[in-house]
Amino acid sequence: MFRKVLIANRGEIAIRVMRACRELGIKTVAVYSEVDKNALFAKYADESYPIGPAPASQSYLNMDVILETAHKAGAEGIHPGYGFLSENAEFSNRCEKEGIKFIGPSGKAIESVGSKIAAKKTMAAAGIPIIPGSENGISDLDEARDIAASIGYPVIVKASAGGGGIGMKVVRIEEELIPSIESAQRVAKSSFSDSTVFIEKYLEEPRHIEFQILADSYGNIIHVGDRECSIQRRHQKLIEESPSPVMTPKLRKKMGSDAIKAAAAINYTNAGTIEFLYSKGKYYFLEMNTRLQVEHPITEVVTGVDLAKEQLRIAAGEKLSYEQKDIKQIGWAIECRLNAEDPLNNFTPSPGKLRRYRSSGGPGVRVDSGVHTGFTITPYYDSLISKLTVWGRDRNEAIERMKRALFEYIIVGVTTNIPFHKAVMNNEYFRRGELSTHFIDDHNIIAEVEKVIESEKEKGTTLASALGVEDKKVAAITAAVGSYIRASERK
């Protein structure tokens, strides 16, 4: 096992990995940008080193400085968390070249699925269902018209090197096809330095279902159950649950088997996720994420598998701690991503200082966070405040427990999406498990969010109001009055 590991990330995921290391007796090294100097993760680690200014390009994405720091600290391995360098094949290769273990897959494995076009070809060759569409990047517009006509509208134009919905264009009629392709190419070039785009059949009301996989260097591969991640904004997940409400034992066995085949097709090692779209009784390969997912806590909660520890063990050359027969999903877990963002303003980020912060607790509640009262959510990074996860014996209990946990959560100083999560938990379609990636628009959830906010203002039905915790405006007035009183007392 490693003696010392550097975590090339920040916030809650850095703390999550450090906790696993601490339990395994591994010393930890944190790296931080200028604005994260006093962040909780930087204090939690055994050692901490500055790596540059706030912009990620000058700090958390600076491979030279991170590798130099790893050598300086004597770290034997680097865990990338998620985001930043976690799916960067060059970084994985450089770690290997410099004698530092990258706690993730090989650069070759990352490259093999980094291009969506290449990944689809690999999965099709392995016998895994793929969405009908173009086999290669679009280079001829007349050919693009023929492909779209053959698979039928609506179609979707995607960036081959993309992610997070960037560059995606849904096309419902032929007249929109060429302008959409040209627009997607421009966005892809700007965002990924690769203008390659392709066409796929657009699935109506699809569900986003994924399988967690673990693979060691001895050829052992297992899946650790399924997750439903259909509730999204701008193709980015907000609420996840495990298991999926649509899953049956037969479907889980078939999809899980294909997830394992997908990992085997690229000689994968470490933790990863195979993502599928499910529509009208059929599923199709979407993409593979070659890292630990943001939503991994729900899998850990229902299976008891510590995915971060397994990553470390696999990277250290150990065999998997589990066989497929050991994996059982018990009960139900739901995760809500609590972000500093305004759901009434197209989920625009809301950076600022947390004037009051109190997380939920009690039976069946897990909070993964890296913030505290006085912490500042900056505009430089993702606006995630915490991941709130609950477990229940069944889905209904998990929903009710999440409602209770959301009621308990107190965040003052920034606008958050907590009202959005409350609205979803109360929505009749969500409660029935009738989900799709278009859930927010299809059920006009934003109008329900407005109702939640207005109701809480009128009735004071939050724990914050019960405890006398004020909103930003009232808090500012209270602080000003307090300052005046203290100044008068000094006189």
Image: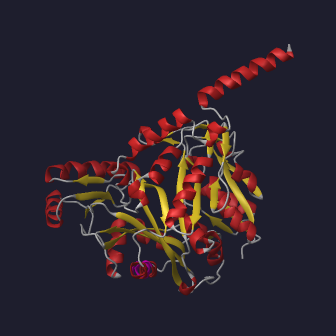
Asked whether residue 398 is drawn in magenta, I would say no
Percent coordinates x, y for residue 337 in the rendering: 53, 53
Where the N terminus falls, by quadrant? bottom right
| Residue depicted at 50% across the width and 65% down the height | 395
Q: Which residue is drawn at 44% across and 79% down?
A: 256
- Kindly tell me whether residue 113 is visible in this rendering: yes
Q: Tell which of 268 and 155 is nearer to you.
A: 155
Total of numbered circles in the picture? Answer: 0
Q: Picture coordinates of residue 489 (x, y %)?
A: 84, 17
When asked about the image quadrant of residue 164, the answer is bottom left
How does the figure colour the protein chain or chains?
secondary structure
In the rendered structure, the answer to whether residue 318 lies left or right of residue 169 reads right
Quarter holding the C terminus? top right
Give the side of residue 211 with respect to residue 24, left or right: left
The prevailing secondary structure element of the residues shown in magenta is: helix
Residue 449 on image: x %, y % = 44, 42
Extent of the magenta region: 254-259
Residue 178 image offset from top left, x and y in percent: 19, 51
Res. 204 image quadrant: bottom left
> In the current view of this chain or complex, which residue is farthest to the right?
490
Q: In this view, does 242 lie above or below 356?
A: below
| Residue reaching furthest to the front | 459
- Residue 386 appears in view: no
In the image, what residue occupies the spot 39% across and 47% down? 445
Please tell me which residue lies in front, 476 or 273. 476
Whether residue 372 sits left or right of residue 260 in the image: it is right
* Residue 182 against residue 476 in the figure, above or below: below
